[in-house]
Amino acid sequence: MGEARVDPDNRATTRSQALYQRARSVIPKGVYGHYGPAIGEDSPVFFESSSGAHFTDIDGNTYVDWMCAYGPMILGYNHPVVDEAAARQMEAGNTVSLAAPVLVDLAEKLVDMVEGADWALFGKNGADSTTLAVMVARAATGRRYVVKVDGGYHGSAAWMQAPGNPGTISADHELVLTVPWNDVAALQQILDEHGDDVACFISSPYHHPVLADNELPAEGYWPAVEGMCRKAGVVIVADDVRAGFRINLAGSHVEYGFQPDMVCFGKALANGHPIAALVGTNELRQAAGDTFYTGTQFFNAAPMAAALATLQELEKIDGARLITNIGTRLCAGLVDVASSHGHDLRSTGVPGMPYFRIAGEGGFRFHARWIAECVRRGAYLLSYHNNFVSAAHSDTDLKATWDIADQAFTSLSSTELGS
């Protein structure tokens, strides 16, 4: 599975679509949650195998994967070092009536790697980390309110979903206040009005909403936020679940010059094995220890071994720098290809997690058509979400993706001329 292998003229996704219809009879929506919106009439839905930076769907089409399983894959699918570490631990034991020593090893590794971290706790999903962070902040401060950024996503718990989403009620959001991204004055206003009852400010290190350009912090934004929160006694929570280890191995906050009280990790922490982590400072150690938030599978030892191996491999290859370099080349190449066809492709966010948007005539509808044509030819991207870069993406993958993007624009031009 060394390269993309999709013939757009003879491509079929009939097996995927047939299995999808079977799934709909026993699973609500067939494929639910964040995987669901990617499904169209001729979309691949189910994979057969994966390796490196590629996956093959059950119809035999192989794609260069620029979604990386929505972020978890950072070293490459089926990475031998990571998977062997997980397998060795699995043979010794995974879910047992006692904790495994690797629990301590992994916590020590995170404390050693992440700037400002003095302790670590573990869960399974990013939402475990963010929910626990808020609980710890409330336990430490005795306060109620959470402040977040408009459009910021911190997991699927009801308190973080958009008001009005099915299954949520107004009470879920009564203690959640929102401010625009990069708006220091708006945050100060909330702290002036509610500061003595604000437990924490939670935000990703940079803003990566869905269906909108990603935005980096303005100059001086995070130092200003840190100063305001310190003065008001508000806990700062950095949600690094999505960007963690793709910007800086010591935590994305290091890149932007601030020190959070807690940092949430997930996704790429174990290269696809299910684990999430919350790290924090000594000032919150007692509150973290007193806060009860746990799960039957939280002490799975195999994912912890995988996480430890992943972090060690990322250090060995200087993973964040490598991923940034690959992402920079990907984005520049795609922008050049688009320009050669007369289109303005915008790439926002960080190179390791780029969000693409074609500006100008046609808007999102044209952009979505171009992305669909790329997928039809073997480059798996999404139109409504940031994409992801891994250390496994090669020069061959980059060239293949640029060629596919070029062919996709040509195809759309021919379609428009013929219409």
Image (cartoon, rainbow, N blue to C red):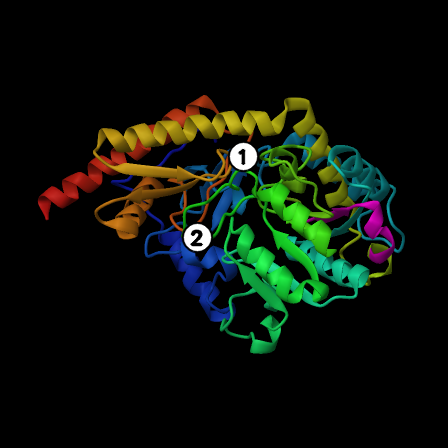
13 lies left or right of 85: left
Secondary structure of the residue carrying numbered label 2: loop
Q: Are marks 2 and 1 in contact (CB under 8 Å)?
A: no
Q: Is residue 320 above or below residue 119?
A: above
Q: At 54% across and 54% down in the image, what residue appears?
A: 185
What is the CA distance from the residue labelled 2 to the residue labelled 1?
17 Å
Query: Residue 4 at what x, y percent from top left?
Result: 40, 33
Q: Front-most of 380 and 149?
A: 149
Report the disc number at residue 238: none
Looking at numbered disc 1 in the image, what kind of residue is underneath it? Ser
410 lies left or right of 238: left
340 lies left or right of 398: left
Q: Is residue 396 above or below residue 62?
A: above
94 lies left or right of 340: right
Secondary structure of the residue carrying numbered label 1: strand
Report crowding for label 1: few under 14, some 14 to 19, many 20 or more residues within 10 A (C-alpha). Answer: some
The number of discs equals: 2
Answer whether residue 267 is visible to the viewer in this image: no
The magenta span reads: 274-287
Q: Front-most of 366 and 21?
A: 366
Looking at numbered disc 2 in the image, what kind of residue is underneath it? Val
Q: At 72% across and 33% down in the image, what residue appears?
A: 309
Query: Residue 408 at what x, y percent from top left?
Result: 27, 38
Q: At 47% across and 70% down in the image, what residue appears?
A: 25
Q: What residue occupies the far left of the structure in this picture?
A: 418
Q: Earlier in the sequence, mark 2 or mark 1?
A: 2
Q: Front-most of 279 and 24?
A: 279
Is 283 included in the stretch rendered in magenta? Answer: yes
Q: At 31% across and 49% down in the image, what residue appears?
A: 368
Query: Residue 179 at what x, y percent from top left?
Result: 53, 58
Residue receiving disc 2: 45
Report the disc number at residue 51: 1
